[in-house]
Amino acid sequence: MKSFSIIIVTWNALEHLKNYLPSVTQTDYPDFEIIIADNASTDGSKDWVKSTYPEIKIATFDQNYGYCGGNNRAVPFAKNEILLFLNNDVRVDKNWLHGLNHAFEQGDQVAAVQPKMRADKQPEYFEYAGAAGGYMDKYGYTFCRGRIFDEVERDEGQYNDSPNLFWASGAALAIRKDLFIDSGGFDEDFEFHMEEIDLCWRLQNQGYIISYAPDSVIYHLGGGSLPMGSPRKVYYNFRNSLFMLWKNYSSSSLRKRFLLRLILDVIAAYKALLSGKPKEWWAIAKAHLHFAINFIGVNRKRKGLQSQRTISQDPDSMLEMSLIWKHFAKGINRFRDL
């Protein structure tokens, strides 16, 4: 049986801790610990945790390092075999760790596992950020079983199998601690958004598997740090996607697909402009500008990562199709219809 270290990064989110942490502390599992990674909160979060749950570890930082930096810096405080990065707005079923444990016991090639994610406010539906596990098409567009773009499905048991995923959501990401450390952890240049996809891709390029545990259920509020439709979210979405693709594509895919992805981004930018969304247009333009400015560093990372990969082609979990074509041209809104 695996042991888990649950790491919850928080910054001035006392109300989330009061609402969601109690369910995590009531987990029914023989070997787990909880670590609060506090990014210099000033709202009394640390004092409340200390007085309410004195058994919980608190890792206190000198500033707000965000999701990537906060989680990376909390790992040295973890004593157990499996790290479980959990958002502070997640409610869990009390038996949720048993399903994750079962997934890891399928073999040493399983590097990371995601539980089933439902929406906290509409628990009969999947949750946008992770649903029943993440995938990516050949041009780098990400989606989930149970969510394509903004179309979210009701959970009717249609995704209760356990296939290999392309990525596991960072809202509830369980990963072997040794692999997380050996891989370098989350890339802090990402700041927010897609850092977990980048990490999962790196692990797959070394021959590991990302899995899904349908009998482990959590409920995620979501939308706190990067609200849907905000120009800031658009910026990180496009910029970090470019970072990720350049770092991790196989050599053949980089030659064949990266230029077309740039063209699709340009089309998306001008579509936003013509739709009366100048802030979205500027967010996409700024993302490409910043990718260009940081290109030397990103390319240096690519060279290092490509020298470490053990598979020459892209992972089998990358779906060889265009999500843009399937969704916008053919009107497909459900994963099972792709």
Image (cartoon, rainbow, N blue to C red):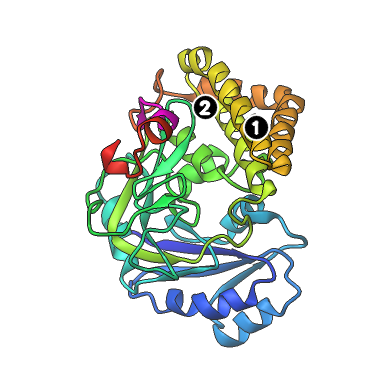
Q: Is residue 61 above or below residue 133?
A: below
Q: Is residue 220 above or below residue 306?
A: below
Q: In the rendering, which numbered label is found on residue 127?
A: none
Q: Which residue is mark 2?
A: 248
The quadrant of the rendering that contains the N terminus is: bottom left
Q: Is residue 333 above or below residue 329?
A: below
Q: Position of residue 162 (x, y in %)?
A: 25, 48
| Nearer the camera: disc 1 or disc 2 | 1
Q: Amino acid at mark 2?
A: Asn
| Pointers 1 and 2 in contact (C-beta within 8 Å) | no
Instruction: State the residue at coordinates (26%, 56%).
Output: 102
Residue 322 located within the stretch drawn in magenta: yes
Residue 259 located within the stretch drawn in magenta: no
Q: Position of residue 224 (x, y in %)?
A: 60, 62
Instruction: State the residue at coordinates (68%, 41%).
Output: 276
Is 8 left, or right, of 109 in this rendering? right
Q: In the rendering, which numbered label is found on residue 269?
A: 1
Q: Amino acid at mark 1?
A: Ala
Instruction: Tell me where the magenta segment starts and ends, as one range.
Output: 318-325
Instruction: State the residue at coordinates (49%, 30%).
Output: 140
